[in-house]
Image (cartoon, rainbow, N blue to C red):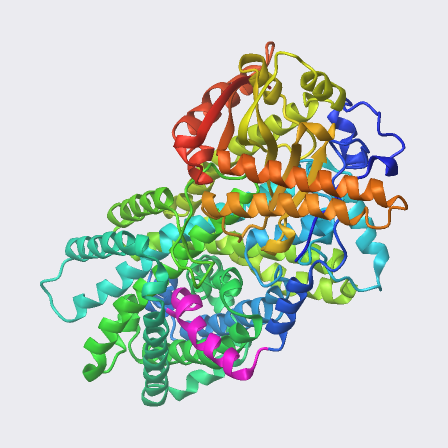
């Protein structure tokens, strides 16, 4: 178990340095500010064994475990991409098939797209860029943040690099290009803002996927009932789909773990059906479609159809919807298990399905608008229909869960307004539920389904969201290949010229359909990014304000010496986001209530750019001088996947760690030459532990800063609108800190103060 050492003032010759320096010097000086409020304690060697052991265990997982995870991943990861055969050909040939060989051209496009992007790019490149086993846009961003100082909030600490999961293993060759790019990013504020902007855009697009996937998947699956009965109208299909969507969102609060094990069998049956039906159609109708593996048919397709062929790419790209889930959900499984399930289950089944549908279309060109259900052999129609509806629900569930996860990650970076994150499973930590987001997703899905009513326009919107996320992932991946992996320049150029250009080609096509539904994900993303930008911008401004107005060590000593200050029994936890120093609101509190509990701990919650922080490395303690004040600083470090525990558990762990800190101080006295002095000091340490125990028994009080923020006098119109109206409107209508951190209201005291930003 790791302990935290207290900074020894004798080690810091410039201890008396003023702490009122401007925050603009922080990037260069960081925590080398060598005074008792800004220098964090060192850590006892040996920390991180837990993290390394966990990593080693994951690395040496048996094949039995890998196969079990691969089976589970089929249900969670591939629901979206697995249901794409429902609508790809119909979305591609919106105007019908003009030439029989056009089917071969589109099939060839689908085959090469499936091979280059899901199989080559994601399975063999992107999965390798996981962040300690976690994936997604924020995982890539956090990986870059750990390697280069590109964060916009100056709360980095030297001790963060000692967390076992923090270090990035780096090759030693090809350093010149990597160092040059790293230096440019660290010294360019526009580059830092652009990377954060790109991360927000990717997050917004993934959330957009969470809206569009349920709509198009359920609508496509339910639409198959038209083939069985002529009385079923499109309006009835839309309302049935809406009812299924409402039920789907209602059950979210129970957690995916309660139905998780049913996902894999459903998708496995689905893959078996579409793969088997595809192979049957391939043999029955036209085995010659196998010649579509020749890319010549792609060139012939573009030569015949020219602009129409380019426009049709917006339908072809729907064959790879949900590919981002391969990376986003890797945290629930392992890289090897996802590679295994993709290569052995999903990819062969999808190839068989698309080849079979192409063979069917070669003989039934007029049925392209309903290719999937028309190509099903009669006896298998109803079983396939039922499984299709179930598979579409599974696909929807996967994207909804992914949306919850990525919002949880963005919360840790201050990029999303406070919402309550409910962990629905004690066994699977990644399974979360966010009530507010679930409600808004349901309304958005219903709006899209009832508003668009058909899969063609929803498909146009869906394509833009999918390709944007893929292009952003490629951009981050190129940075990682250069800076962290230090890949050979030929590998990087080859990646950009093949996969990069292919994605840009698809992006140009889907943007062409902007006015045919393509505007929806862009409008939705613009709305989400506006909210995220407002929240993040004011969050940073507040941090810099506290940094510039923090209480100096001398000021704290002056406050402690006041005769009007009353010390009362109990332990006070004073919460602040400020990592370096004492926040200005503390002075405001004492000016109005000159009373201080016997023991005071300033608690700062801090998110590190890693997925998880081991419990033994989470708390970073140090003492605030003078010692007789019994005042301490505690930085509580979380990863973006960590669970914020219930307050009672948190209080107990925090107090135990504080006592361990005090005991550790006595260890440093063991070698004292004067045994009498050492004994006296050890006795004093014991008394201090008793003071902490007594204060805990007397009761804990939680002091929360309730900061009102306003634009400073003389601010421009844009700044006043941003802070006074937009941010404050968000803050008033969202959850407060005590609700997010489970702080009990009966033991809570809010301290109000106005920040002029």
Q: Is residue 640 inside the magenta stretch?
A: no
Q: What's the residue at 63%, 49% (across, down)?
A: 609
Residue stretch in magenta:
61-82
Q: Is residue 43 visible?
A: yes
Quarter of the C terminus within the rendering: top right
Quarter of the N terminus within the rendering: bottom right
Residue 119 percent location from the top left of the image: 55, 72
Residue 319 percent location from the top left of the image: 43, 66
Q: Residue furthest top?
A: 714
The residue closer to the viewer here, 634 or 710, is 634
Q: Which of the 4 image quarters holds residue 536?
A: top right
Left or right: where 651 falls relative to 365: right
Q: Main secondary structure of the magenta part?
A: helix
Q: What's the residue at 46%, 37% (across, down)?
A: 418
Q: Residue furthest front?
A: 676
The residue closer to the viewer here, 703 or 539, is 703
Residue 190 percent location from the top left of the image: 69, 36
The residue closer to the viewer here, 723 or 253, is 253
Residue 620, compared with residue 552, is above or below; it is below
Residue 464 percent location from the top left of the image: 46, 52
Q: Is residue 151 visible?
A: no
Left or right: where 546 falls relative to 17: left
């Amino acid at each position: 178990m790791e302990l935290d050492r207290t900074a020894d003032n004798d080690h810091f010759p410039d201890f008396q340095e003023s702490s009122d320096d401007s925050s603009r010097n922080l990037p260069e000086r960081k925590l080398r500010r060598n005074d008792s409020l800004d220098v964090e304690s060192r850590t006892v060697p040996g920390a991180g064994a837990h993290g390394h052991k966990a990593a080693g265990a994951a690395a040496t997982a048996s094949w039995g475990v890998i196969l079990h995870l691969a089976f589970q991943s089929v249900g969670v990861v591939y629901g979206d991409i697995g249901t794409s055969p429902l609508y790809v050909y119909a979305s591609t040939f919106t105007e019908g098939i003009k030439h029989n060989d056009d089917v071969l051209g589109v099939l060839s496009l689908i085959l090469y797209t499936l091979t280059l992007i899901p199989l080559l790019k994601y399975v063999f490149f992107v999965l390798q860029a996981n962040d300690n086993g976690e994936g997604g846009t924020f995982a890539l961003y956090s990986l870059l943040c750990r390697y280069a100082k590109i964060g916009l909030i100056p709360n980095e600490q030297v001790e963060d690099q000692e967390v076992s999961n923090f270090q990035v293993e780096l090759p030693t060759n090809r350093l010149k290009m990597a160092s040059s790019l790293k230096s440019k990013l660290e010294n360019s504020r526009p580059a830092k803002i652009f990377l954060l902007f790109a991360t927000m855009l990717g997050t917004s697009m993934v959330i957009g996927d969470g809206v569009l996937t349920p709509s198009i998947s359920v609508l496509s699956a339910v639409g198959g009932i038209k083939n069985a009965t002529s009385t079923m109208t499109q309006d009835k299909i839309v309302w049935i789909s809406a009812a299924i969507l409402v039920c789907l969102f209602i059950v979210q609060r129970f957690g995916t773990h309660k139905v998780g094990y049913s996902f894999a069998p459903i998708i496995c049956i689905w893959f078996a059906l579409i793969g088997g039906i595809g192979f049957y159609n391939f043999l029955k109708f036209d085995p010659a479609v196998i010649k579509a593996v020749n890319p010549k048919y792609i060139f012939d397709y573009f030569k015949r159809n020219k602009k129409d062929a380019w426009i049709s790419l917006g339908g072809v790209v729907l064959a790879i919807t949900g590919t981002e889930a391969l990376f986003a959900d890797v945290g629930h499984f392992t890289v090897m298990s996802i590679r295994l399930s993709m290569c052995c289950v999903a990819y062969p089944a999808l190839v068989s399905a698309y080849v079979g549908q192409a063979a069917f279309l070669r003989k039934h060109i007029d049925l392209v608008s309903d290719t999937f259900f028309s190509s099903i052999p009669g006896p298998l129609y109803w079983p396939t229909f039922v499984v299709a509806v179930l598979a579409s629900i599974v696909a929807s569930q996967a994207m909804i869960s992914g949306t919850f996860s990525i919002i949880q990650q963005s919360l840790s970076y201050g990029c999303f307004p406070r919402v309550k994150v409910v962990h629905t499973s004690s066994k699977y930590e990644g399974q979360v539920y966010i009530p507010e987001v679930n409600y808004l997703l349901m309304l958005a899905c219903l709006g899209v389904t009832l508003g668009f009513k058909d899969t063609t326009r929803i498909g146009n919107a869906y394509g833009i969201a999918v390709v944007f996320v893929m292009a952003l992932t490629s951009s981050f991946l190129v940075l990682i290949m250069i800076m962290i992996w230090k890949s050979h320049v030929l590998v990087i150029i080859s990646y950009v010229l093949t996969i990069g250009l292919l994605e840009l080609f698809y992006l140009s096509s889907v943007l062409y359909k902007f006015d045919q539904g393509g505007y929806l994900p862009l409008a939705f993303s613009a709305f989400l990014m506006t909210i995220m930008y407002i929240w993040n911008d004011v969050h940073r401004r507040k941090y810099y304000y506290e940094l510039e107005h923090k209480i100096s060590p001398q000021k704290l000593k002056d406050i402690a010496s006041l005769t009007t200050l009353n010390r009362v029994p109990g332990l006070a936890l004073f919460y602040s986001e400020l990592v370096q120093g004492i926040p200005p609101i503390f002075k405001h509190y004492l000016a109005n209530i000159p009373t201080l509990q016997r023991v005071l701990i300033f608690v700062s919650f801090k998110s590190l750019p890693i997925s998880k922080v081991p419990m033994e490395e989470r708390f970073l303690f140090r003492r605030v001088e003078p010692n007789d004040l019994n005042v301490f600083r505690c930085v509580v470090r979380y990863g973006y996947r960590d669970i914020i525990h219930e307050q009672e558990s948190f209080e107990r762990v925090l107090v135990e760690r504080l006592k361990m800190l005090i005991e550790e101080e006595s260890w440093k006295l063991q070698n004292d030459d004067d045994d009498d002095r050492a004994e006296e000091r050890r006795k004093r340490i014991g008394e201090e532990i008793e003071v902490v125990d007594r204060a805990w028994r007397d009761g804990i009080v939680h002091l929360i800063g309730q900061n009102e923020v306003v634009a400073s006098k003389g601010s421009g119109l844009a700044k006043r609108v941003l802070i006074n109206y937009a941010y404050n409107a968000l803050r008033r209508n969202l959850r407060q800190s005590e609700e997010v951190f489970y702080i009990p209201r009966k033991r809570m005291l809010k301290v109000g103060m106005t920040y002029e930003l």
